[in-house]
Amino acid sequence: MTLDKLQKSRDWIQDRPLGFRLLLLTAVTLLFTLIIHPNLLVTRFPYGLGDVAEKDVKAQRDFLLEDQTATEIKRQQAVQDVLTVFDIDTELAGRLARNVEEAFADMRALRRTALDTRSPLPAPAPESAAAIGADKKPDAAPQPDEMRKNFEDRLGIRVSKGAFAALETEGYSKRIAEAIGETLQKITENGVVSTRETLLKDFEKGVVLRDVHSREERVVRDFKQFYSLEQARSLVRNAGQPLLRDLDYALVNVGVDVCQRLIQPNITLNRSETELRKARAAGEIKPVLYKIKQGEMLLREGERVTELHLLKLKAMESEAKPEQFFLMVLGSAALMLGLIVMSYVLLLRRVSSDWDNPIQNLLLMACVFLVFQLMAQMLVSFGEVLIRNSPHAVSEASVMFIVPLAAAPMILCVFLGLASALPFAVVMAVAAAIVFKNSLPMLVFFLISGSMGAYWIRNCRERKVFVTAGAKTGLLAVALAAAVSAYTGHFSWADLIWNSVFAFLGGMGSGLVAAGVVPLVEITFGYTTDITLLELANLDRPILRQLMIEAPGTYHHSVIVGTMVEAAAVEIDANPLLAKVTGYYHDIGKIKKPQYFIENQRNGKNKHDKLAPSMSSLILVSHIKEGVEIAREHRLAKVIIDGIRSHHGTGLIRYFYEKAKLLKGGDAVKEEDFRYPGPKPRTQEAALVMLADAVEAASRTLENPTPARIKGLVKNLMDRLQSDGQLDECGITLKDLNTIAVSFNTILNGIHHHRIEYLDQRQAFDETGRGKAKNGHPDRQPSKRAPDIPAEIAPPDPDHLRRAKVS
C-alpha cells in the first residue's frame, strides 16, 4: 500500500512538473522565513519578580523600550521650567475708591435725612393730623449704631466708634473719601502681594503676571516694584498725609486707618492655572526610548529577574502585534521568493535544461539550502553561548566565520556540476547575510568562499579532494576574514587572530562536512558520484570476480565493452567513468545461466539446440531481470541498474525470431514475444553500452576482422539500432554516432589486429602442412606477416625474442 502511494506521488510529480516546482518554491520560502524568524509568534515568558531565568532570552526583533527614569527626569525638568502664574487685578484700587465714595455719599444722605427728621415741622390741622396719623407714621431717624453698620457693610471693613464719630462730625467729607481713593490708587498701582516670600520662591526664573481682565501676560523677574501687604499698609500714612494735611490730626488718623483696612493684595497666586500648565508641560514630554536590537541579550540563564528585566520582556511582548507578524512574514517571504525566482530564471534555467531529472535536482537543492541555513542559525546561537562562558575575549561576530556554509555549494558541485553550484552559492550567500543580521561583509565572505570551494572540488574523484578543497577554502577564508575586519573597522590583533582561526576552521570544516554529507545524499536521492564509480570500477569487487570465474567469456566481453564506451564517452563529452562502470556490470545477470550464452560455451556444445526458440528467447531476456536483482543485492548505484535494464532496450532477438518463423511460419510468430522488455536507453552512457555490447559481440563472428569489415559491421549495427528506435530517448545525435563509430573502430582494430608470424611458427606450419584453422583465433595461431609491415622491422632472431620473453 505504501509503495502504491509512493508510486502515485511520483506519477503526480512527473505529470505536473510546474505544480511541483511552485509547491517546492512555496515550501522553501515559508521554511526559510521560519528559520530567520524562529519566534515570529508572540512568546510569553512566565517570569515574576525574583524568579531565576531557566534559559537565555534574546530580543526576537528590534523594539523600543521607554527609559522611565530619563523620561521622569525630563518631565520634572519641564515642570520646573513652568513659571508660576500670578493674577493681577489692575482695577481693584478703582473699585475700592468707588466703594469709598459711594459709602461716604450714602452716609451723607443718611445724615441729611437724620437732620431733617430732628428739625421742627408746622402743626397740622386737627382733622388732617388725625388722618395722617391714621394712614402713616412719620419716619424715625436712623440710629448711630445702625448707620455705622451700614457704613461698614458698604466699605467691607470694621470701623471703630471713635473713627465713625469723627467722620460723622466731619459730615463724611467728600475730600476725605477722595483722599482715601487716591491713596489706594497710588499704592496699589505697583502691585500688592500678600507676602513677598510667595514671589521670592521664583526669584531666579521669574513669574507670569496675568491681567485678570485683559488676559494679557508678562514675565516679571524684578520683584522690588511689588509691595507686600504690610509694606503697603505702612506706606499709607506717607502717601495719605499730603492729601489730608489741612484736616485735623484725628481725621488724618481716621483716614489712614480706613485706608489701611481697605488695602488688599491685587496680585494673587493662581494655583489652579499653574498646576494646569505644569500638567500640560509634563504631558507634552515624549517618552525617552532606546532601541533594543534583535539578538540583544535581555535575560541570561541563572539571573534573578528584576523589574528592568520584566519591563524589557513586557515591552517585547507588546511589540509583537498580529499585523506586524503578518507584515514580517510577508516581507521575508517576498524577499526570498524574489531571490529564488531571479536565480532560477537568470542562472539555473539554462543549466536545468540539461538535467536528466530536474525534479530530483531541485528537491536536492531545496533540502541542502534549508538544512545548511538552519545549521547556520543553530551554530551561531550555540557559539554565542560558548563564547559568553569562555574565559577568552572573543567577540560574537567571530562565530559567524566558523559556519561551514561553503559545504553547500561543494555538495551541489559534486552532484550537479559547477554550472549549477555557482548560482546556488549566490543564493546561499544572500540568505546567510539575511540570517546574520543583514550583513553585507558576510554576504561577500560566503559568496567568495562558497564559489571557490565549489570550483576546487569540481573534479572530485577521490576522498582526499574534499580535504584539499577544504584546506584551500580555509586559507581563502582567513584572507577574507581579515578583509572583513578591516572593512568593519574592528581591526585589532586579538579579533584578527580569532577571526582567522574560526575562518580556517569553517573552511576546513566545509570540506569535511561535504565529505560526510555526500554519501548520505547518494543514499537518500539515488545519486552516484565519481568516487563511488571509481570504487565500482575496481575489477576485484566480489561480483566481478564471480563473473570472471563463472562466466569468463562474459567477463572478457564486459571489460572490452567498458574500454570501448569509456573512449567513446570522452569523444562525445559524456561521463566516461559512468559509461565504463556500466559496461563492466551490464551483463552480470548471465552469472545465473552462463552456459546459455555463446561466449561461455565450451566444446562446441550449445544448449539452445535442444530448446524451442521461444524458450531460448525467455532465457536471454531473463539475464536483464536477474542482472537487476543481483545489482540490488550488491547495492549498486541506481544509474548502473538503469544501464543494466536498458542495455538491450526493446531490441529484437533476431536469431531466435527468424528461427521461430522458419519452424512455425511467419504468421504464427509475434515479434513482440522476441523483444527485450526495455526500457530504451535514456542517457548517453546507457546508449553507448548498448552500441558497444552489440558491436563487440558481433565483431567476434568476423572470420577475417579487417579494418574495412569492422567499419562496415559497426556502421550496419548502429544504423539498425537507430532505425529500430532504440536511440530515440538518449539524446545522441547523428554527429555523435559518427564520432562513436570512429572510436569503436579504433578500439576493435586494436583488439583484432594481426600478429607477426614468428620463425618457429613458420617451421611448425611447414612441417605439419596445415594452415590456420578456419575459425581459429589470431592470438592462438600463427599468422602471416601482415602485408603492410615492412620486412626490416620483423624480428630477425627468434632467440632474441625468447630472451625478451615476447614469443
Image: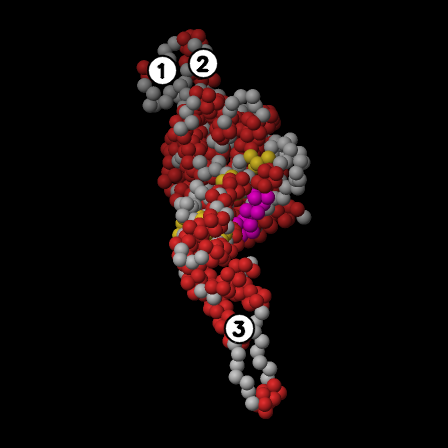
Hey, what amino acid is under mark 3? Ala
- The residue beneath circle 2 is 807
Q: Which quadrant holds the C terminus?
A: top left
- Closest to the camera, between mark 3 and mark 1, is 3
Residue that numbered label 1 is attached to: 794
Q: Secondary structure at mark 3?
A: helix
Q: In the image, is residue 26 above or below residue 443?
A: below
**Callout 1 crowding tier (Cα within 10 Å): few <14, some 14–19, many ≥20:** few
What kind of residue is marked 1? Ala
Task: Identify the residue shown where x is 57% and y is 23%.
Answer: 390
The numbered mark, 2 or 1, whose residue comes first in the sequence reads: 1
- The residue at which mark 3 appears reads as 114
- Could you tell whether 651 is left or right of 711 in the image? right
Instruction: Tell us which disc is closer to us: 3 or 2.
Output: 3
Q: What is the total number of numbered labels drawn onto the structure image?
A: 3
- What residue lies at 52% left-to-right and 84% top-to-bottom? 122
| Direction from residue 633 to residue 188 in the image, left or right | left
Identify which amino acid the numbered label 2 is placed on. Answer: Ser
The answer to which of marks 3 and 1 sits earlier in the sequence is 3
* Image spot of residue 749 (x, y percent): 40, 28
Q: Tag 1's secondary structure?
A: loop
Magenta-drawn segment: 314-325
Cα distance, mark 2 to mark 1? 13 Å
Q: Is residue 344 visible?
A: no
Q: 235 and 27: which one is in front?
A: 235
For mark 2, give the secondary structure: loop
* Residue 501 seen by the camera: yes
| Of residues 349 and 224, the one drawn nearer to the viewer in this rendering | 224
* Residue found 57% across the figure and 29% down from its top: 385
